[in-house]
Image (cartoon, grey):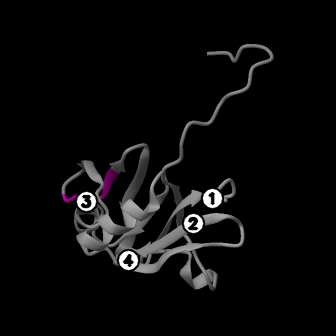
Amino acid sequence: MQPKSGTTARLKSIAPQFVVPDVTAAAAYYRDRLGFEILGFFREPPVYSIVRRDAVEIHLARADRGLDPAPNAPHRDEPLDAYVWVDDLDALFAELQSRGARIVEPPTVREYHCYEMAVRDPYGFRLAFAMDVSERS
């Protein structure tokens, strides 16, 4: 299909891929602790899974040859592997606390006008959940 002249494509979403040693356990963590839905597993034993919550998807892929997960943590002092925008951070914080998620930074307003918190999954991947508060008084 040829693009129409003068038009530009609009990006709709992004789905990070986290490499983990155990796809089934990782998907269960995202379901049980972070409230995602497991959309499916691929191959047997599973080498890939997709989890989704609302419009956010995360793809989970099994590490090859028994290699370790590869989060950004070894490369940065304050690493993030995904930054997720939400509409009610306080409600999400309460929910994730009740689910037993590993919250590594509670909700905090940052100098860049975002109200955010961070969680870490069992494999070291760190996700920030945030709201833009630049318009708040």
Q: Earlier in the sequence, mark 1 or mark 2?
A: 2
Query: Mark 3, residues whose alpha carbon is within 10 Å: few (<14), some, or many (≥20)?
Result: some
Query: How far apart are the two marked residues, 4 and 3, measured between alpha carbons?
Result: 15 Å
Q: Is there a contact, CB below 8 Å, between mark 1 and mark 2?
A: yes
Kindly identify the amino acid type of the residue bearing the numbered disc 1: Val
| Image quadrant where one finds the N terminus | top right
Kind of residue indicated by mark 4: Tyr
Q: Position of residue 5 (x, y in %)?
A: 78, 14
Give the crowd class for mark 2: few <14, some 14-19, many >=20 residues within 10 Å: many
Which residue is at 32% across, 73% downward? 21
**Three-letter residue code for mark 3:** Arg
Of mark 4 and mark 3, the one earlier in the sequence is: 3
| Label 3 residue SS | helix
Question: What span is in magenta?
Answer: 45-51
Count residues near mark 1 (Cα–Cα under 10 Å), then give few for <14, some for 14-19, many for 20+.
some
Relative image position of residue 100 (x, y in whole percent): 26, 75
Mark sitting on residue 99: none
Q: Which residue is mark 1?
A: 133
Does the residue at mark 1 contact the one at mark 3 (Cβ under 8 Å)? no
Q: Residue furthest right?
A: 6
Q: Which is more foreground, mark 2 or mark 4?
A: 2
Report which residue position mark 3 lands on: 31
Residue that carries the numbered disc 4 in the rendered image: 123
Q: Nearer the viewer, residue 31 or 94?
A: 94
Identify the residue at the far left of this view: 44
User: In the rendered image, which residue does mark 2 sit on?
Assistant: 115
Contact, CB < 8 Å: mark 4 with mark 3?
A: no
